[in-house]
Image: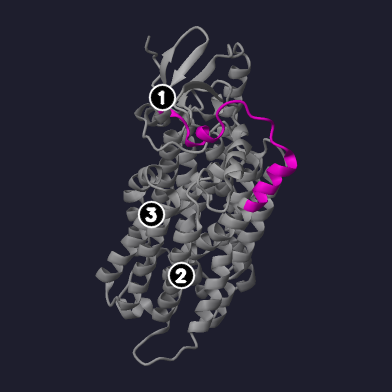
Amino acid sequence: MSSDSPNIMLRDQKHVYLSTKDLDTGAQLVVGPTSPLDLDEALRIRRKIDRHIMPLMCALYWIQFMDKTTLGYASILGIQRATNLTTNELGTVFYLSYLLFEFPQNLALQKFPVGKWMSINIFVWAVALVCHAACKNFAGLLVVRMLLGACEGSITAGFLIVSSMFYTRTEQTLRVGYWFLMNGIAQVVAGFISFGVLHINTKGFEPWQWLMIITGMTTVILAISFWFLFPDSPTNAWFLTPDERAKAVQRIKENQTGVENKHFKMEQMIEALTDPKTWLFALFSALNNVPNSLTNQQSLIIASFGFSVLQTTLLSCVPGILEILTIFTGVRLAAQRSNSRAYVGAMYFIPSWFGILLVNLLPWSNQAGLLVGQFLAETSVPGFVLSLSWLNNVTAGHTKRVVTNAIMLSAYCVGNAAGPLMWKDQYKPRNHVPWAVIGACYVACPVLLLVIRAVLVRENRIRDAEPVDTGEEYVIEQITEDGKRVEVNIDKEFLDLTDRQNRDFRYVL
C-alpha cells in the first residue's frame, strides 16, 4: 500500500521501501552494513578535505568582500567626483539585486553542481568589476553593481551547502568562522591596495579605476582556479579516492542532514516557510545587517574626524583586524563550549554598545576617542557568523536547507539595503539618527539569539519525552553486477528527512 510520506514508496510490517530519487546522494556510498569509522582515519580525511577546499573558500570570501567594498574605498579615491555618484544609493541597489536573485541562486545551487555554478558566478562578477573602470556616470555604475549583487547570491549560500556536505556540526562552526573572517583580511588588504593606488599617476586613468582593474583581474584568476579545483560534493571530490569518498560521507553521519539531494521537494519548502525558527533567524539577520552600512561609510566617517586621505586609508585597516580577532575567538569559544552559540554571539554585542555611546557622547574634538568608539561599534560580527552555521546545523532536508538559507540571506539583503538609506546629509557630522538605529538593532539582536535558543531547548525536551523510534528498516532495491535484484538497508540519516520529520534529530544550541 502507498504511504502518506512523499519519501516512502511502500511499507510492510518491518520494512519501508524507498525510491532512489528521494535518497540523499551520499546514501549510495554507504548502503548496507558499514563498520565504525576509525577516529584517526576520520581525522586524516578531514585534514585532506581542509587542504583542498578551505584555501579556495577563504580566498574567494576574501576576494568577494574586497570587491564588494571597493565602492567605499573608491569614494575617497575620486569616484564620486568623476561619476557624480551617490554611494548610498548604489549600496542599496547592490543588495536589492542580491535580494532579487537570492532564491533563483539557491535553487540553481540545488539543481546544478555547486562548485561549477559558483565558478560561473565568480567569473561574471569579475568581468562586472573590471567594467567599473569604464563607467562614467551613475547609470553605468548602476548596471555593474546590479550584476555584482546578482552573482554574490551564490557565494555565501554555496559555502553553507558545501560546509554541511564535508564537515560535522562542530567543524562547521569553526570553518564557517574561518572563511567569514576573511572579510576582515579583505578590509586590511583593500586598505593597503587603496593606499598603493593613491601613488599611481597615470594620465587619463584615475586611482579608483586602477583599484577596480586590480581587484577585478585577481577575481578572474580565482574564478578559473575554482572551476578546475573546487569539488561539487564529497561523493565526487577529485582529490578523494573512492574509499575516502565513502568514509567522508560516513564521517558526517552524525549531522543527520546527509550530503545533498538534487530533487526539489515542495513539502520541504512549505515546512521551511511554516517553521518559526526560520523567521526568527531571518529577523535576526535583517536587524543585524542594518548596521553593516558602516562598512561603506567607514572611510567617510573616519575622514570626517579630521584625518587625511592617506591616514584614512590606513586606519580603515583596523576594523578588519578587529573582525579577524573577534570572529576567530568567537567561533573557537562556541566550538569548545557545547551548546553556547547564543551566549557567545550575544556576548560580542556588548563592546559595540560601548562604541556607539563613545561616538555619540564624546566631544567632536576628541579625535582618538571617536576613533576608538567607531572601531568598537563593529565588533559584533561573531553573532552573525555563528547564526549562519547554527541555522545550517539545526535544519535538515536538502530542499528545506536551501529555502531557509535563501530566506536568511534575503533578510540579510533587506538589512543591508535599508542601512545605507539612513546616512543622510542632514544628520552629519555626528550622525546621531543612524547611530540610534544601529544601537536599537544591537539591543534586539542578542535578545533574538536567546529567544531562538529557548525555542530549540523546548523542542528538544518535547522530543526527549516522545516514545523511542520503533526501529523500522529502510530498504532500497539495487541490481548487482550479475543482474540480480537485492535489498540493501539505508541508514535513516541519509533519507533526506527534515528536522521535523526525523524525530531522532536533536537541535544543537
Q: Residues within 10 Å of mark 1 (few under 14, many from 20)?
A: some
The stretch drawn in magenta includes residue 10 = no
At 50% from the left edge and 33% from the top edge, which residue is drawn?
Answer: 28
Which is in the foreground here, disc 2 or disc 1? 1
Which badge, 2 or 3, is on the more N-terminal residue? 2
Q: Residues within 10 Å of mark 2 (few under 14, many from 20)?
A: few
The image shows residue 167, relative to residue 264, as above or below, that is: below
The image shows residue 178, relative to residue 171, as above or below, that is: below
Type of amino acid under label 2: Ile
Which residue corresponds to mark 1?
19
Which residue corresponds to mark 3?
417
Q: Position of residue 378 (x, y in %)?
A: 57, 58
Marks 2 and 1 sit apart, C-alpha to C-alpha, by: 42 Å
Q: Position of residue 209 (x, y in %)?
A: 39, 80
At 43% from the left edge and 36% from the top edge, which residue is drawn?
Answer: 261
Marks 2 and 3 sit apart, C-alpha to C-alpha, by: 29 Å
Quarter of the image containing the C terminus? Answer: top right
The residue most toward the left is 139
Mark drawn on residue 221? 2
Q: Which residues are magenta?
A: 22-48
Q: Is residue 471 visible?
A: yes
Which is in the foreground here, disc 3 or disc 1? 1
**Tag 2, which secondary structure?**
helix
The residue most toward the right is 40
Type of amino acid under label 1: Ser
Q: Is residue 69 visible?
A: no
The stretch drawn in magenta includes residue 44 = yes
- Asked which quadrant contains residue 467, the reply is top right
Which badge, 3 or 1, is on the more N-terminal residue? 1
**Tag 1, which secondary structure?**
loop
**In-front residue for pair 91/271:** 271
**In-front residue for pair 27/76:** 27
